[in-house]
Amino acid sequence: METTINVTVNGVTKTATLVDNVATKALLELLAKGNVTVKTDDYGGFEKVGTFGTRLPIDNSQIDTVPGDIVLYQGNSISFFYDNNGWSYTMLGKLDITYIKEIKTFLAAGKGKTDIILSLK
């Protein structure tokens, strides 16, 4: 399965390609019911993180993230990485953006609270 979703930040929409696992299947089922807005904030100088308001199934493994990675944390939080980190996450996918500077600009890295909207393509 290679599935693409829309990710919208501050009125700008980009795509993200999801991996195939139990968490992404549950995410797609959630998005089939409508858009999901995640209220995120910067954390640690390397990610935007926020909660779903619901839990998704986890399939954690130790991951060294890179800018553009999208992961599930503790089953109910989603993180959008704009720098590197390593931790036990469930990989969801990756923004379809090539350059780190563009990823940081898109995610409003370092600018505090940001709503990120996920939707089906």
Image: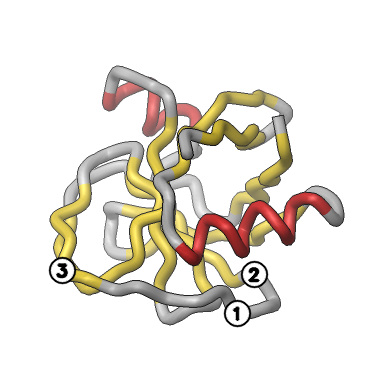
Residue at x 50% of width, y 64% of height: 23
Question: Which dot, 1 or 2, sits closer to the camera?
Answer: 1
Residue 74, quarter of the rendered image: bottom left
Q: Which amino acid type is shown beneath numbered disc 3? A: Gln
Front residue of 75/105: it is 75
Cβ atoms under marks 1 and 2 closer than 8 Å: yes
Front residue of 25/98: it is 25
Name which of mark 1 and mark 3 comes first in the sequence: 1
Residue at x 51% of width, y 54% of height: 112
Residue 96, quarter of the rendered image: top left
Residue at x 34% of width, y 48% of height: 81
Cβ atoms under marks 1 and 3 closer than 8 Å: no
User: What residue is disc 3 on?
Assistant: 62
Q: Which amino acid type is shown beneath numbered disc 2? A: Phe
Callout 3: 10 Å neighbours few (<14), some, many (20+)? few
Q: Any mark on residue 16, and which?
A: none
Residue at x 31% of width, y 18% of height: 98
Label 3, secondary structure: give it.
strand
Q: Is residue 89 left or right of residue 64?
A: right
Question: Which dot, 2 or 3, sits closer to the camera?
Answer: 3
Q: Any mark on residue 52, and which?
A: 2
Marks 1/2: CA–CA distance: 7 Å
Q: Position of residue 3 (x, y in %)?
A: 54, 35
Query: Please, which residue is most extreme toward the right here?
Result: 33
Q: Which amino acid type is shown beneath numbered disc 1? A: Arg
User: What residue is disc 1 on?
Assistant: 55
Q: Is residue 51 left or right of residue 83?
A: right
Q: Position of residue 53 (x, y in %)?
A: 69, 76
